[in-house]
Image (cartoon, helix red, strand yellow):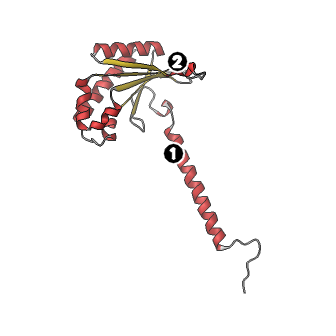
Amino acid sequence: MNTPDALTPSPRAIVGRARGSAATLLAAGVSAVVLAGCAGPHGHRADTASAGAHGLQTLRSPHTQAQTLARLEAQLTQRQLTVAARVDHAAAAQRVGQALAPTVVVIFGNPQAGTPLMQCAQTAGIDLPMKALVWTDAGGQVWLGWNEPAWIAHRHGARDCPAAVRLGQALAGLAAAVVAP
């Protein structure tokens, strides 16, 4: 008769450990995916717009933070887009005693461009007006980022929205002009 000794785990204990190990591996895998999704612009191609995992387009700016913001607002004005707001996250952080590298969101648009996107998917209105983010990373590099309109349309269930394509092309042109040397 085979009798288990004190060092031999029971079948129930083996299954319990396997479940625990699987749960640990699953948690580690989920954590790795979440952390990878938090990667900054370092995962993007250095000098060209690239689609981030969540629809974020980024361009490296050869200009200072202030110059990039001024160039962005000049391009918006030139293209008859209204600046609805400018949110300086670093200034807000400073007011509450926290530090944040320069990070500014410019909210802009016009009904001529935004309405057709909402006609494809009305809930896209939550993502409009459009926003551009100008930030300086820890290495001192200035970046310009924006949400890709096709991603916004897709997020709201409009996979084939010609307005999103047109808006995306217009934003890519605007962004290229902002970061041009």
| Residue under the point 56% across and 51% down | 27
Which residue is at a point 53% across and 24% down the rendered structure image?
A: 137
Quadrant position of residue 14: bottom right
Q: Residue furthest right?
A: 6
Q: Is residue 51 left or right of residue 81?
A: right
Q: How far from the left and from the top, in percent, is residue 169? A: 28, 27
Quarter-wise, where is residue 58 in the image?
top left
- Tell me: 129 left or right of 38: left
The secondary structure type at the circle numbered 2 is: helix
Residue 121 sits above or below residue 112 on the image: below
Relative to residue 151, is residue 61 depicted above or below?
A: above
Residue 155 image offset from top left, x and y in percent: 34, 40
Q: Which residue is mark 1?
A: 33
Of residues 91 and 50, the one nearer the viewer is 91
Q: Looking at the image, how many numbered discs can be counted on the residues?
A: 2
Left or right of 160 in this view: 33: right
Tag 2: amino acid: Ala
Q: Look at discs 2 and 1 and give the one toward the viewer.
A: 2
SS for dot 1 = helix
Can you tell which mark lies on residue 91? 2
Residue toward you, 158 or 42: 158
Instruction: Give whichever of 21, 157 is nearer the camera.
Output: 157
